Image: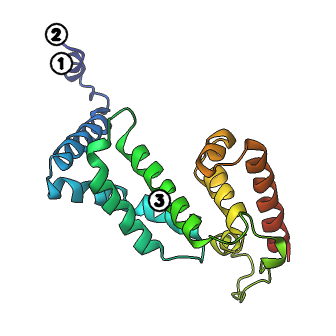
Amino acid sequence: MTIGALSLEAGLTPPPSTDNSLAQADSEGADVALAAAGDQQAFERLYRLHSARIHSLVRRMVGGEGDPDELTQDVFVRAWQRLSTFRGEAQFGTWLHRLAVNLVLNWQKGESRGRRRFDSEADVDLTPGRRHPVEAAMDLEDAVARLPPGARRVFVLHDVEGFRHEEIAEMLGVTSGTSKAQLHRARMLMRAHLER
């Protein structure tokens, strides 16, 4: 006799199943395999599952510099083109997240040709924006968007997305010390902006 049958005989309800998350992972894996074989509906399901998170990441990384909608679309176009390279060693969402980070970093490199890698503080507009009647409502997204591009990239990757300094250094092509310095700079600039 199974545990579920014993529970029912004793008048107890069986514990909730944890199979839902497993089923979702299996479903995503099946959709990845179908999409890699050219199934557009499977890829659309993957898009619906991941588009909000990818858009949020892209929006935070570009700040006010670019069009996050267009870059998010570019991420999914690139994912469709490169789906055959997905080996399944990581979850699809992780692979897609990394693809988005790389695409935004490459876009930013193209946008900043001829400029220094990290802008100076003199270029930062830290004047507070128009305040709403409720002073307690801080616009953290606005504070992040006002950071210089280098500091913003490191802040988003470390404090928002949870990457380690070594991973950030590898992604950005800098040392981990530079990553730490840029994170410190970002935090100090945000503190100065939010204390005004």
In the visual, does 135 lie left or right of 39? Answer: right
How far from the left and from the top, in percent, is residue 81?
28, 55
Crowd class of label 3 (few under 14; some 14 to 19; many from 20; radius 10 Å)? some
Instruction: Report which residue position mark 3 lands on.
Output: 103
Taking the view exactly as shown, the residue that stands out farthest to the front is 114
Q: Quadrant of the C terminus?
A: bottom right
What kind of element bears circle 1?
Answer: helix
Q: Nearer the viewer, mark 3 or mark 1?
A: 3
What kind of element bears circle 3?
Answer: helix
N-terminal of the pair, mark 3 or mark 1, is: 1
Q: CA distance from mark 1 to mark 2?
A: 6 Å
Labels 1 & 2 near each other (Cβ < 8 A): yes
Kind of residue at disc 2: Met
Instruction: Report which residue position mark 2 lands on.
Output: 1
How far from the left and from the top, in percent, is residue 163?
61, 44
In the visual, does 22 lie left or right of 38? Answer: right
Q: CA distance from mark 2 to mark 3?
A: 55 Å
Q: Residue at x 41, y 63 (%)?
A: 52
Kind of residue at disc 1: Ala
Q: Residue at x 63, y 58 (%)?
A: 156
Q: Which mark is residue 102?
A: none
Q: CA distance from mark 3 to mark 1?
A: 53 Å
How far from the left and from the top, in percent, is residue 152?
68, 63
